[in-house]
Image (cartoon, rainbow, N blue to C red):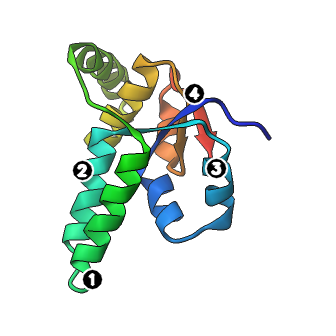
Amino acid sequence: MSMPGRVVLDTSIVIAHFRNETSVIDKLQQISVLVLPSIALGELYTGALRKETNREKAVQIVADFAGLAQILCPNATTARVYGQLRAVLLKKGTPIPDNDLWIAAIAVQYHLPLANRDGHFDRIDELVQAKW
């Protein structure tokens, strides 16, 4: 299956890559540009810094991966998309975690698919997903 040129990566996908899941590694190799939201990068650093052993190595692994990706940060447009998505989800009574909503807002803003493993992203109609 050919993958789009650019795909936004959710934290769950990067963690699967770090765990050497062959299916994820194969899909990542087919993508020309890995897009990593700064929010996901923050989650990855949080996980690395919480490690009791091999903390420095874990931080370096995150930094090395980030160096391979295009990092996208939220801006005023992202905030508006986030607000629109959150308002709809709250009206439906089906909110999702805030960090994931920011990640989804970036994907929606840039019209890029979001590679993820989380079912709650299904609640966002505007989001194009790549379920890995």
Q: Nearer the viewer, mark 1 or mark 2?
A: 1
Marked residue nearer the N-terminal end (4 or 2): 2
Sequence-wise, the earlier of marks 1 and 4 is 1
Q: Does residue 95 appear anywhere in the picture?
A: no
- Residue tagged 4: 128
In 3D space, how far apart are the residues under numbered discs 1 and 3 (Cα atoms)?
Answer: 27 Å
Residue at the image position 51 percent from the left and 71 percent from the top: 19
Secondary element type, mark 3: helix
Q: Earlier in the sequence, mark 3 or mark 4?
A: 3
Pinpoint residue 58: horizontal percent, then vertical percent: 31, 71
Amino acid on which the number 2 mark rests in the picture: Gly
Q: Which quadrant would residue 130 be assigned to in this image?
A: top right
In the depicted structure, whether residue 4 falls above or below residue 12: above
Q: How many marks?
A: 4
Q: Label 3: how many residues lie within 10 Å, few (<14), some (14-19) or many (20+)?
A: few
From the top left corner, tell me how far across and down residue 120 is, in percent: 47, 43
- Closer to the eye: label 1 or 4: 1
Q: In terms of depth relative to the viewer, which is nearer, 30 or 87?
A: 30
Name the residue at 27% across, 13% down.
Answer: 77
Mark 3 — residue? Answer: 29
Q: Which residue is identified by label 1?
A: 54
Q: Given contact means CB atoms under 8 Å apart, are the residues at marks 2 and 3 in contact?
A: no
